[in-house]
Image (cartoon, rainbow, N blue to C red):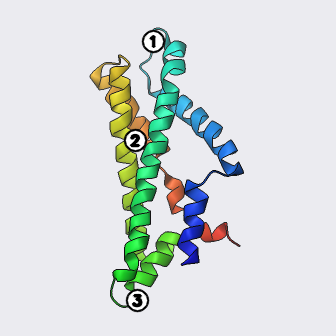
């Protein structure tokens, strides 16, 4: 029981780690957005200044959706028959590579969060005035680069 609670505290409750994570995430989003914008765009710096924080918030919201999915799997894993629940719970909590089913679940959570990033960022960029094709291209780059691949890092490394 303690294992999943440690992960919940690590992800959802503020800590000193957030003081590093938020600026780093903002910087990465700004760089990827800059890369994703059309070449020769007018007022590029102004566009970045006005919209990067929105992209950053959408990324955090999307990561939250993926982590919420993993949390739901953890809560429901005790209802699985036999050893399945324990194996999946350990894989999702500690090491996704320890069990193939756990790895598939974590990869699916990364894909869900990446899809949310794409959809939200595309909407934000279209509303900000980008052409539909340019918004789609930039949102795709943002989703592919900024998806929460850290879900795949074995958290057991943090608890040693």
| Marks 1,2: beta carbons within 8 A | no
Front one among 159 and 10: 10
Whether residue 154 is visible to the viewer of this picture, yes or no, is no
| Residue at numbered disc 1 | 40
Please tell me in which quadrant of the rendered image residue 74 appears. bottom left
Whether residue 41 is visible to the viewer of this picture, yes or no, is yes
| Residue at numbered disc 3 | 83
Please tell me in which quadrant of the rendered image residue 37 appears. top left
The residue most toward the bottom is: 82
Up the image or down, 129 lies above or below 146; here it is: above
| Residue at numbered disc 2 | 117
Question: How far is mark 3 from mark 2, CA to CA?
Answer: 34 Å
Question: How far is mark 1 from mark 3, CA to CA?
Answer: 57 Å
Apparent side of residue 118 relative to residue 92 in the rendered image (left or right): left
Tell which circle, 3 or 2, labels the residue nearer the N-terminal end: 3
Q: Tell me residue 84's x, y (percent).
A: 38, 84
The circle drawn on residue 148 is none
Element at badge 3? loop
Q: Tell me residue 81's x, y (percent).
A: 33, 88
The residue most toward the front is: 13
Element at badge 1? loop
Apparent side of residue 133 relative to residue 68 in the rendered image (left or right): left
Q: Tell me residue 7's x, y (percent).
A: 57, 65
At x 39%, y 77%, the residue is 77
Q: Residues within 10 Å of mark 1 (few under 14, many from 20)?
A: few
At x 42%, y 55%, the residue is 66
Up the image or down, 74 lies above or below 23; here it is: below
């Amino acid at each position: 029981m303690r294992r999943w609670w440690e992960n919940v505290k690590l992800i959802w409750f503020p800590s000193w780690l957030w003081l590093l994570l938020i600026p780093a995430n903002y910087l990465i989003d700004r760089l990827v957005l800059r890369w994703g914008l059309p070449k020769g765009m007018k007022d590029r710096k102004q566009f970045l200044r006005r919209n990067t924080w929105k992209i950053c918030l959408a990324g955090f919201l999307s990561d939250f959706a993926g982590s919420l999915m993993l949390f739901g799997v953890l809560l429901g894993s005790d209802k699985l028959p036999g050893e399945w629940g324990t194996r999946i719970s350990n894989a999702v909590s500690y090491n996704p590579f320890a069990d193939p089913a756990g790895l598939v679940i974590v990869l699916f959570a990364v894909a869900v969060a990446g899809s949310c990033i794409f959809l939200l960022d595309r909407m934000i960029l279209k509303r900000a005035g980008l052409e539909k094709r340019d918004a789609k291209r930039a949102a795709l780059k943002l989703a592919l680069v900024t998806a929460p691949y850290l879900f795949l890092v074995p958290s057991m490394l943090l608890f040693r």
